[in-house]
Every structure is written in structure tokens, then in C-alpha cells.
Amino acid sequence: MFIYLSKKIAIPNIARLRCISWNKEQGFIACGGDDGLLKVLKQETHTDDAKLKGLAAPSNLSMNQTLEGHSGAVQVVTWNEQYQKLTTSDQNGLIIVWMLYKGSWYEEMINNRNKSVVRSMSWNADGQKICIVYEDGAVIVGSVDGNRIWGKELKGLQLCHVAWSPDSKILLFGMANGEIHIYDNQGNFIVKMVLNCLVNVTGAVSIAGIHWYPGTEGYVEPDCPCLAICFDNGRCQIMRHENDENPVLIDTGMNVVSIQWNHCGSVLAVAGSQKVVSQDKDVNVVQFYTPLGEHLRTLKVPGKQMAAVSWEGGGLRIGLAVDSFIYFANIRPDYKWGYCSNTVVYAYTRPDRTEYCVVFWDTKNNEKYVKYVNSLMSITTNGDFCILATKADDSHPQYVLVLCNSIGTPLDSKYVDIDPQFVTITKTHVIAASKEAFYTWQYRVAKKLTALEINQVAKTRKEGRERVYHIDDTPSGTTDGMVDFTKALTATKDPICCITATDKTLIVGRESGTIQRYSLPNVALVQKYVLNCRAYQMSLNCNSSRLAIIDITGVLTFFDFEVQSAEGSGQQGAGEHLKFERKDVWDMKWANDNPDLFAMMEKTRMYVFRNLDPEEPILTSGYICNFEDLEIKSILLDEILKDPEHPNKDYLINFEIRSLRDSRALIEKVGIEDASQFIEDNPHPRLWRLLAEAALQKLELKTAEQAFVRCKDYQGIEFVKRLGNLQSESMKQAEVAAYFGRFEEAERMYLDMDRRDLAISLRIKLGDWFRVVQLLKSGSGDSDDTLLEQAYNAIGDYFADRQKWMNAVQYYLQGQNQERLAECYYMLEDYDGLERLANSLTENHKLLPDIGHMFVTVGMCDQAVNAYLKCNEPKAAVDACVHLNQWNKAVELAKNHNMKEIGPLLSKYASHLLEKNKILDAIELYRKAHHFLDAAKLMFKIADEEAKKRTKPLRVKKMYVLAALLIENYHEQIKVTQKGKVKGKRSEATSALAGLLEEDASSVDNRIIDNAWRGAEAYHFFLLSQRQLYEGYVDAAMRTAIQLRDYEDIIPAVEIYSLLAICAAANRSFGTCSKAFIKLESLQTLNSEQKQQYEDLALEIFTKHSPKDNRKLEMDNNPDSEDGKLPICIVTGRPISEYQFWMCSTCKHCAFEQHITSRNFCPLCHTSVA
């Protein structure tokens, strides 16, 4: 930062000032002094000139009111900014609260304790409460409307300072003996503060100031020190919070009277006086420090006795009360900012975020890109690139250099172990320096790299694209300095204080005044020069022949490298520090295209120098962005940072230098001839271009061509040639108007000449398609239809780019642009429109697959399938169905289009269904796809599981029947396929046999296929037996139950024999019953308790009845026929011994004919009997 005194206001009657306070919000300045002096002043700027803003604008006092009411010396003044109140108190203890009414200040409240004197008053951060401390230890906390909240007498303590914490939960009381006590906001003592800065201090000390920055504008870094405490002996500590055990310690070496933070907590002003060794008297000084204790600047102030200091709300000015004067000093802050390729990059802090907000503001298009960066240290720019230097994190002292383009996109980054306090960037290198060492990084930016080049870039890291040099080394430029940060940490007696570089030279300045010059890109120490000043900022001109140096006190001097030695031998001499100097300089910029031109900022004036001769100054307080083509681009950063989220183009100012202004005046007033003579004497491409443009306006083509040649503008020369070939004068004028961007005028001229085609082609070049449509509709021509379509599509594109899809649709429809229409319908979610479009397209149209894909992404299966089928892509249609889980449709499509991959597709879907435990769906799928065996297996599995549950036997029977029917379908299928295979005259028996053989060969699970009906039979007889029993046919029931003995593998034996025992007992066949009991008692599946119950029951039955059957069972008489087991009748459950019986066509089970006649359906498989 740079600071200089700018104004001085004298207080009448030479009353000595005691205190000063500057209202941050409204800009009022209150100052109090001896004999009841209290004044409120306000400075306001009055200017009509838009370029004059901020510090450069002339200001005068818009308010100068003396407030009557105090008799003694006014000692404390403090503002309540939220409620526009001023609170003052004098040596008699009188407190007055003043309010603003119709532009003047009036007493609102008065309070006088008459016991003691007020030493300090402080409003809390939100302006709701005030804390007043008296010398005798009394403390009063009051509200903004004058009510007392609480009061307390701190016995035996002499108070002299008070401060609120930002959250208003804590009060700090400063004692006359230098101690600071911490209280809560109800006045309860918590603890004494540890004052590390007073270690080893002897003698009495008093507190000069306590200021706790409330964080209203955010903090410059996370966990930033914000509580400043300073003592009259110059010792100071800055703490992160009231209990900080490791505060930042400063010894200012001066006698301090007052301290204050600026508006954003980034600079602490410490005011007081300093002993000067050579003279006896003290000198008034203000020292400026960062929150981390780094010293920024010293401001010396005339006068005898400094009393107080106060910052302006924007942090750009500071007010000092000295004797009976108020001095004002202007501050030029070191903003974190830069300028690269029409983009202003600036950073600011926000109260709601811990990071810096970095804005990349493209001034050409007025667009801004925002990036949040943690612990930003600096912004450096050059050409099209920007370097952000940041701290990596707290845990490790590492730093990051991020290379960004002009919209803030990171292109590359490097971690470095040195603290990059000074950073500069050239077209090829980034150079970062700490106090002891500097690091060079030859950056590359990938335009478009091939794989080969990428590999090379990866290798070059090893070949020394990054190097580190210690400031005390003398590199020769040949050795490959490896990246070794360890040597960079060695201390040096003469630290680095600034650096600058161009493409071929690197300059490093040191605190002693030595300047070291290195060559680039291979870093070799060329020469050392000794200056008699400590450089603060350096800058090389465009050909690296001259160095501009601004020293720590703001003096600008120059150093010439290319001074010929006296002998005239032409060898490089020791260089020369030129006699030229300017004071109070805070910014300077060399012209990019002329080594003798530069612009500099001195206080609030900008001077342009040519060969060290100044032109007349321009009033401005802007920072210089760029100086080329005889124009200076300057930016009013002070104004932009007042509202950093909405940068305004008015704050970007272009200044033309004198030769450009003079040439323009000559051309306008005197004529082209004389102007061309003047430009000949002061040649510059920009001036030749000015002349060429003026000559074009007047259609002096010869002069224009010569001028274009002098400024090497090939397009200009071509344009003049083309103009020369045109016959009509008005045509030439129209072309010139178009060349200078006066398009409306050019179009009007074309239309007046009846050349609508030229007007249209002009608008097409400009991309103004709306106007093209208007022009096309205003007349008729052959090629108009295709042009109209093109125009409609271009307008459609215009709306689509801005995501106004509805408007785009209308134009695409007119332009018949089906591809973009599809996209718009999709974006609008107008799927009906999309479907209509798909239907209107011809078969195999190239857009159909895309439309199909759009439908798939939103889950519209039918429409997607239709689109894919229309463009003859059944495979894609099937994939879409699979993707959307429409497996039925997928299988159907695959079958319809005879696709091979139906098998894997099925298994995929089936496994998908089984995963979700949808087994019945899987069975249905297999059945539809004619995979009967797989379906049957799943069905048997379900039936088995259902049987285990022992719930509804009828349901289980149905399941077994279904499974068996599926197996029958499978047999049929095998037969049919065999028939298809066996061509020729072989008998059906042969093919059936072949079918069986194949079945046998392919059979995975013979048990299922051979005994398909066993499960159904078992449950059929189980149910039949019970039905007969309940209907009273006990004999039939017992005979049916006897058949169940063959099915122990399906129905548990306990169930079978229990049923048999009941039926036999009911039928009084106790022999059979006895056998059933014997079987039950011998079952392994029962536990001993259950067996015991069966034994008891048997004992009970067979003590009453002897275990013999009354009737001989028929089945004992007729043994099984020779062929094996007799068939069982599925109606009655009895074996069939007759030769004539009925057999079901589906399940191949038998029944007595007389029994089946009364039935319509087979009792087992429920097939129709007819």
C-alpha cells in the first residue's frame, strides 16, 4: 500500500483536539477537543465528470456544524452507525447522545453521574447496546433507546478502556495499570487476559488502544487475528480471540496514542510519536501493519502532538487529530488484482465465506466468472494468463501456484516449498520468490497436444522446467538446477524485496539496494548493480533496456542497463542510475510497444512520459491496466470494490496520450495533408491507422492505402483495393460505412441503390438473422426460399442457444430442421410432438435412431420400438425393451424377427425376475417362450416349497398339475420338432421313438420328466380319501388311503399313516389300522413324546378291539396282473381289473367307465372329458 497526506483542516480558536471518529456508514467526522469543542464535518465530492471518481474528485465540506453542550474538554466520541447516533462525553463526566434531524445534529439524551469521568464508551457490533466505563470503576450498559440494562461498580479498579467482542457475548475492560480483564455481557468476571507483549517490560505502562474488528467485511484469511491491543510503550499484540495463547506480537518502537483497524480488518493503523536520534524532538508517525504483524508503511505527520486516528468507511482515507488540525491522508491499497486479455481479475473477502472471492470480469462482453480460493496470497497477470498464489493448508507450510486463463479455468498448478511473497509472470516463465530464494517454472499451455507431445511434456519436468536458486548463489545458466527446496530455506543477510522479469531478463531487488540481473530462459547471473534506495516495485520496459524503480517511500527513479562505456568500445558498462526522480508515485506502467513511453500515478494524477518528458497530468485515482497503441486503460478499483459483485463498465477508463489527441485534432480541424506530415514526424502504427481511417471516410483512397501500408494492415490494403474497383460513389460510401461498423447506414444505402441482396449478405455476415427475415419478406427473388430456411434455422439456433426451446421450435418448424426440432421437443419434454415427428419421417431416416434413443432415456418403450423398427433396427428395439424391462415385448420382437439371441435374452430376464423373487412371472415368461422344461422345473420348485408349508393341499395339487401339464407340453414340443427333422417316408413310430431318444438325451432331470404326475397323483388321492371319509364312504376312503403308501416321498409318512389309521378304524378294519399304528410308532421323524402318544392311543384302541380285519380286502384276493401294477381309478381310488376302462387324453390316467360318465372333466388334470 502507499499513503500520502492530502488535506488539512484547521479548527477555529486553535482549540487542541483530543479525539476523532469517522462514521463508517454515512461519512460524518466527529472531533472533540478542549473547552467543550465538538464539531461534526462531512466531506462530499462534487463533480459532473464521470471519469473523476473517488479520491481524485474535488471535495468540499458539505457539513461543518459545531455542537454546543459540553463545557469541559471532550474526551470520548463514538458513533452508532446503525442508528445514526453520536455519543460524546467530556472531562466533567457529562454524556450527550446526539441525533440527526433535517440535516443538523441535536441533543437527544443527556446523562451525568457527577461522580467520575467517562474514560471510554463502546457500542456493540449491531448498535443495540452501549457500554460506558468510568474512571472510578463504574460500568453501565444501556440500550440504544436510552434504557439502562445493568450497572456495576468494580471495586478498587481504575478503568480506562472497554471493547465488545464481535458476537456481543464478551466485554474487555482495560485498567489504568495496563491489565485487561475479560467479563461476560452480564458483567460477571471470567479471567484476566495474558499479555504476552509485555514480557520483560519494566515500569508503568498504560493501554493506548483496544480494537476488536467485528468481521463485517469478512476476514483476509481463515482464523485471522482481529483483536488488537496496544500499549503506550509501543508494544502491541494481535489475537485471534480473547484467550489466544499465541498472539502476533509487534514492537512498534514508538510512543502510541491511538490504534484502529480499517473497514475490512486487513490493515491496523498505529498512531503516535517517535524519537529521532539526530534531533531532540519527537516526530508524529502512523505505522501500518497487517493482521500477521508485517509492517506495511510509515506516514510522517507534521505538528507537535498527535491525539487520535480514525479510518474512513471505505478504507481509502484516514483522519488524524494533531494539535488543532485534522490531517487527511489518502491510501492506495495493494489490491489483489490483475489485467489479462481484456479481463480484470480482482479478489475480495465476504463476511459469509472464509475464502477469497476472485472475480474474472471480461470487460469486453461484460461477463463475470467467479471462483472461490482459500488463503489467496496474490494475483499476477501477463498476456492471457493469470497466476494465483495460495497457501496449501495450515498443516504443512506448502504453497500452490495456479495458472489460470482469463475466465478462471485452472490450466496447471505447482506446489512449492518457498513462500511466494513476490511473483512475476512472462510469456514463458513464472518466477516466484521468497526472502531467500527464487523459483522458476517454464509453463506450457496445451493448445492441442498429441499423445507424443504429452509424453514429452511429462519428460521435460525431469529436464529442469522448474528450478530453484538461492539469492546468494551465482548460477552460470549451464547446470540443470534440480528442484531442491532444501537449499532455498537457508537464511540470507540481504533478503529479496521485489522481482520483475521480461522474456529475456529477470531482475531481483534486495533490501540493501543491490539489484541482480539474470538472463532468461537459462538462468545465469549477468551482473549486480548497487542503488542507494530499497526498491518496493520494479518494472522493465518492453526491450529490457531500462528499469523503473519505485522505492519504499514512493520515489520513482530509473536505471539504464545499456549505457555505453566512456571509451565507446560498445561493451556493456556498469549501467547508470538516472538523475530523474518523482515523489509520491504509487503505480507505473511501461508501454507494451515503445521502450520510451510510460505512464505513472502520482497522488491523484496520471502523467505520461516520453523520454522522461512529462505530458500534462490527468486527474484520476485509477490503477493502470494496460498501455499500448497510445492508449492507457485504467480501472477505478476503489469504486469497483465498493460493490464487487456488480462491476460497472463506467469504472474502466481509456485515456489517449497527447500525440493521439493532437493527430485527431489536426485531422478534424486542419486536414489530412497537414496531419499526415505531423504523423510522418511522430510515426506510430496507431497514428497511421487513425490517418487511414480518416482518409477512408473522405474516400481519399491513395492516402488511405499508404497509411495502411505504414501500419502493416493487410486487410485494410485489400479493402482499399476493393473500393478502387467499385464504380459507383454511393457504393463506396456504403462499403466504408460497413467497414466502420455503421451497419444501419450501410444497409440504408444499399436499399436506396435497390441492392437488397447486398443488404441481406451484410446482415448474414453480422449474424443478424431477424433482420435477414425482414428483408427477405420485403421483396421476392428466386433464391429466397433456401435463404429463408437458412434464416429460420439460424434464428432457431439463436433461441436454442439461450434455451428458449418454445421459440426455437416455431422457427425450426418453418426451417424444416428436423434434427434440431427433435432436440427441442426433447428439451421441452413434448413427447407427443416428438412422436408426431418420428411418424412423419420417412423409413430409414437417419434421425430415427436418435429419436428412438430419446424415447428410451425417458422410458417410453412403445414409441422407441416404433422408431427403431421404422429405421429397420430390430436389434436396437429389443435392446430398448430389455433396457426398460419390457421383456415380454423383447421376446415377442426377437421371435417376430427370428433373432438368434432370444436364448441369452430369456435367461437374462428370467434371472432378473428370480432375483426379484418373481418366480411366477419367470414361469409365465418361459411358457410364453415355449421353454416348457425350464418353466416346469420352476413350477415343481414352487409346489415343493408350498407342500412343505403344510397349508392348503388343494392349492399344492393344482401346482403339481400345472407343472405336469408343462411337462406334457414339453413332450409335445419334442415330438413336433422331431417330425420336422425327419423328412421322408419313415413311420410316425420311428419319429416318436427318435423324439423319445432325443428327450432322453436332452433330459436334465429324468425324475421330473418320467414321473411328472406323481405329485399330482399323491395330492389327488390324499384329498379324495378325506372327501370319501367325510361323505361316509369309509371303505372307499380306506382303500384310497392304502394307495397313498406309494407316495411317502411326496407326502410325509405321518400324514399318510394317520389318515389310513383313521379310515381303517372307521371302517372297523382293525388289522389295517394296527399295521398303520406299527408304522407310525417306528417313524424316525417323530420324537419320543409323540411316539408315546401313538402307543397310548394304540393301547386304548386295541384293548377294546382285536387287530383283525372283518372283511378280506379285495386287493389281497386279486394280486397285481402279470403286466405289473394295476391302474388306479382316479374317481374312486380303486385298482381297475376290467379290460375296458376310460383313459384321459392329457394325463393318461384311467377310471371306470361307469364312474366317468357322470363327469365333464378329468378329476386329476381337469381336461374336458368330451
Image (cartoon, rainbow, N blue to C red):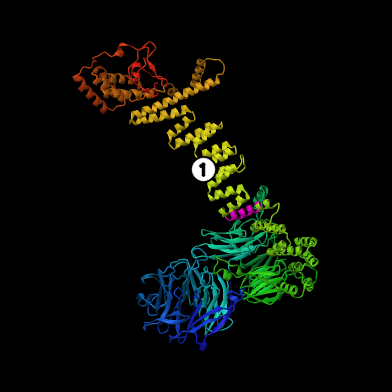
Few, some or many C-alpha atoms within 10 Å of disc 1 (few <14, some 14-19, many ≥20)?
some
With 355 as the anchor, is 1136 left or right in this view? left
Quadrant location, the N terminus: bottom right
Q: Position of residue 771 (x, y in %)?
A: 65, 59
Task: In the rendered view, tell whether residue 1091 sits above or below residue 243.
Answer: above
Q: Is residue 644 shown to the viewer in this render?
A: yes
Q: Position of residue 519 (x, y in %)?
A: 70, 62
Judging depth in this view, the residue of 567 and 85 nearest the camera is: 85
Report which quarter residue 870 is drawn in.
top right
Magenta region? 789-802
Outermost bottom residue = 13
- Of 541 and 737, the residue lying toward us: 737
Q: In the structure shown, which secondary structural element does the residue marked by tag 1 occupy?
A: loop
Q: Is residue 488 above or below residue 666?
A: above
Dividing the image into 4 quarters, which one contains the C terminus? top left
Q: In the image, is residue 791 part of the stretch drawn in magenta?
A: yes
Q: Is residue 1002 visible?
A: no
The answer to if 284 sits in the magenta stretch is no
| Residue identified by numbered label 1 | 860
Amino acid type shown at disc 1: Met
